[in-house]
Image (spheres, helix red, strand yellow):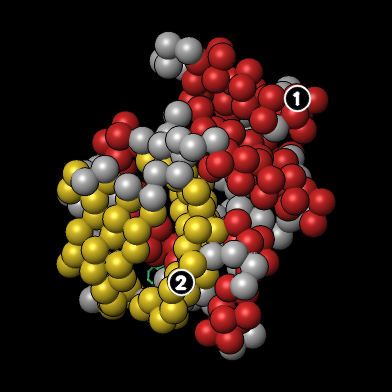
Amino acid sequence: MLELVDVRVAYGRTEIIHGVSLDVPQDGVVAVMGHNGAGKTTLLRAAVGLLPVTRGKILFDGEDITGLRPAARVARGLAYVPQGQQSFGQLTCSENLQVVADGRRNGRNLIANMLDLFPALVPLLDRRAGLLSGGQRQQLAIARALITEPRMLILDEPTEGIQPSVVAEIENTIVELSRSGDLGVLLVEQHIGFALDNALRYYVVESGRVTSTGAGGTEAARTVREAMAI
Ligand SMILES: Nc1ncnc2c1ncn2[C@@H]1O[C@H](COP(=O)(O)OP(=O)(O)OP(=O)(O)O)[C@@H](O)[C@H]1O
Ligand SMILES: [Mg+2]
């Protein structure tokens, strides 16, 4: 459903992504792995329209969205949770959810659904987002993205710097959502175990190129560790 075709991305004259192709179906998780600086975030930013591509194409549901602004991509059903758990730090959790839900017909229901999905947020609704822990902020960020009712959720290292018990909670929620059948997930993740166990397919990105790809599952972990030399 989301397809990157031979995409190249540059900062100024420095090309960082040297022709990457990948395919994310409409349900299930696709994992992108790679070392720090490999170009994972750059690739995601291009996919959601925050960076232009210099060559190649981005297709969503078969439509060429390469030239569309980020907001138009969101309207078509792409949602992006950037690396680093960003929300409006001065606003409360409740307000952070409300600003996304405002203007949506079923806004109130959407917020209620998110609180079912992330019950840890319920006691935090009146707390400023800036005061939350990393794990709590990540759950809030994912909830905000899901309120836009996306068909494709793009997550950049959602478990980075988060304690293991909360990581497990976030992982389970992501997998549950993707298995519900109407959400594709493009996941950048350095936790190889989780990403691969649950992924339909993985891509290893090194220095802006895909150096290994294959079916996900527990068997894939060894191949990927070898490919990444860790
Ligand atoms: N705004 C920018 N201007 C110039 N170069 C940049 C910019 N942002 C990133 N880069 C460079 O692009 C390369 C890829 O960075 P990117 O953030 O995409 O890597 P990453 O795989 O997401 O790494 P990490 O795992 O640390 O998040 C790096 O060499 C980085 O220094
Ligand atoms: Mg990154």
Which amino acid type is shown beneath numbered disc 1?
Answer: Val
Which amino acid type is shown beneath numbered disc 2?
Answer: Gly
How far apart are labels 1 and 2 at the CA level? 39 Å
Question: CB atoms at circles 1 and 2 under 8 Å apart?
Answer: no
Crowd rating for badge 2 (residues with CA inside 10 Å; few <14, some 14–19, many 20+) = some
Q: Is residue 91 above or below residue 172?
A: above
Q: Does residue 104 show up?
A: yes
In-image side of 59 versus 101 (left or right): left
Q: Where residue 2 sits: x, y (%)?
A: 33, 50
Residue at (43, 73) in percent of width and height: 213
Residue at (45, 44) in percent of width and height: 27
Q: Does residue 88 show up?
A: no
How many numbered marks have been drawn onto this rendered protein structure? 2
Callout 2: helix, strand or loop?
Answer: strand
The residue nearer to you, when weighing 123 against 217, is 217
In-image side of 17 versus 192 (left or right): left
Quarter of image, res 124: top right
The residue nearer to you, when weighing 14 against 205, is 205
Callout 1: helix, strand or loop?
Answer: helix
The verdict on label 1 being within 8 Å of ligand 2 is no
Q: On the image, numbered disc 1 is attached to which residue?
A: 122
Residue at (75, 24) in percent of width and height: 122
Q: Where residue 84 sits: x, y (%)?
A: 59, 54
Look at discs 1 and 2 and give the one toward the viewer.
Answer: 2
Q: On the image, numbered disc 2 is attached to which residue?
A: 214
Quadrant containing the C terminus in the rendered view: bottom right
Quarter of image, res 189: bottom right
Q: Is residue 94 above or below residue 84?
A: above
Residue at (56, 14) in percent of width and height: 109
Q: Where residue 103 sits: x, y (%)?
A: 41, 15
